């Protein structure tokens, strides 16, 4: 490892540790979640560089803010105790792998795939955090049946719009900081959000070994693959 790479990893570790400890203090992350986020952040900075790190930071900060927005009115346990190591890993695994890939092959296609993976995670989080507060009951994406707030596969119009805005924020930032195509990042991220809802309604909890974390990994992988096709 070159000296400059070592310095980048060291800086990435310090910045990631400081950010995640602050998040742990305000209960945005559990202790395990803070450890996982520090590892993810260090690897992304070390291999992906500053543009990749900035996208991850933007996703983390905006998602944490939305998670704590009106937290008392939300049913999910992470609003009371923070996101766990498993949740952090599921949301960041594909993006981390793409950052490592980008460190070996700094191509526009890989950078776009990375941006789309982050955009998909942002879209999913924004849709959930905004949609769960909707005054109108969510409806199952596959049938239109009314379901209780927080039910996997349930969608609301305001949550869907919010998710699209979350993907757009990441795609705009990626285009500005990294020169990746906006449409590819936004379209792939938004489509993955809808795919996440379909998977939540059909296979999550119904197929052995497929829970919410597995769906999140599949969703971000689908976004990355779709963006790679669009960016070629």
Image: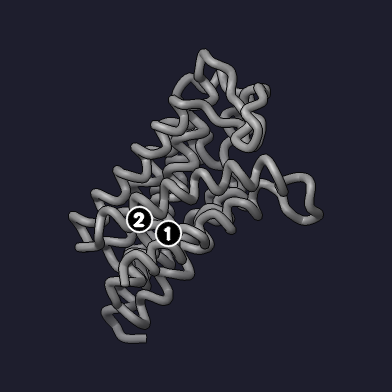
Q: How crowded is mark 1: few (under 14 residues within 10 Å), some or many (20 or more)?
A: many
Count of marks, rendered view: 2
Q: Which residue is drawn at 53% across and 34% down?
A: 27
- Residue 32 visible in this rendered orientation of the protein: no
Between 208 and 156, which is closer to the camera in this rendering?
A: 156
User: Based on the displayed image, in which of its 4 quarters is residue 149 positioned?
Assistant: top right
User: If the image is split into quadrants, where does the C terminus sit?
Assistant: bottom left
- Which residue sits furthest front? 143
**Is residue 156 visible to us here?**
yes
* Whole-number angstrom distance, CA of label 2 to CA of label 1: 8 Å
Q: Is residue 140 above or below residue 146?
A: below
Q: Mark 1 points at which residue?
A: 41
Query: Mark 2 or mark 1: which is in front?
Result: 1
Tell me: residue 106, above or below residue 50: below
Per the rendering, the mark at residue 15 is: 2
Q: Secondary structure beneath disc 1?
A: helix
Label 2 or label 1, whichever comes before in sequence order? 2
| Number of other residues with Cα within 10 Å of mark 2, as a class: few under 14, some 14 to 19, many 20 or more | some
Q: Along the horizontal axis of the image, is 149 left or right of 209?
A: left
Q: Position of residue 44 (x, y in %)?
A: 40, 65
Is the C-beta separation of discs 2 and 1 under 8 Å? yes
| Quarter of the rendering occupied by the N terminus | bottom left
Q: Is residue 143 above or below residue 210?
A: above
How far from the left and from the top, in percent, is residue 183? 28, 54
Percent position of residue 193, x then y:
49, 45
Q: Which residue is drawn at 49% across and 30% down?
A: 129
């Amino acid at each position: 490892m070159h000296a400059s790479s070592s310095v980048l990893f060291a800086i990435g570790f310090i910045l990631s540790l400081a950010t995640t400890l602050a998040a742990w203090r305000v209960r945005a992350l559990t202790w395990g979640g803070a450890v996982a986020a520090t590892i993810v952040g260090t690897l992304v900075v070390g291999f992906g560089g500053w543009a990749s790190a900035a996208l991850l930071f933007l996703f983390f900060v905006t998602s944490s803010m939305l998670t704590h927005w009106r937290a008392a009115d939300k049913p999910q346990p992470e609003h009371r105790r923070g996101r766990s190591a498993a949740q952090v890993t599921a949301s960041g695994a594909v993006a981390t792998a793409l950052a490592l890939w980008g460190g070996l092959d700094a191509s526009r296609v890989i950078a776009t795939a990375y941006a789309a993976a982050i955009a998909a995670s942002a879209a999913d989080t924004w849709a959930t955090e905004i949609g769960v507060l909707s005054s109108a009951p969510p409806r199952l994406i596959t049938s239109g049946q009314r379901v209780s707030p927080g039910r996997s596969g349930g969608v609301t119009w305001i949550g869907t719009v919010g998710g699209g805005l979350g993907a757009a924020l990441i795609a705009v930032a990626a285009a500005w900081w990294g020169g990746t195509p906006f449409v590819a990042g936004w379209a792939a991220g938004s489509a993955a959000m809808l795919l996440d809802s379909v998977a939540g309604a059909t296979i999550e909890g119904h197929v052995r070994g497929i829970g919410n974390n597995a769906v999140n990994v599949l969703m971000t992988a689908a976004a990355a693959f779709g963006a790679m096709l669009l960016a070629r």
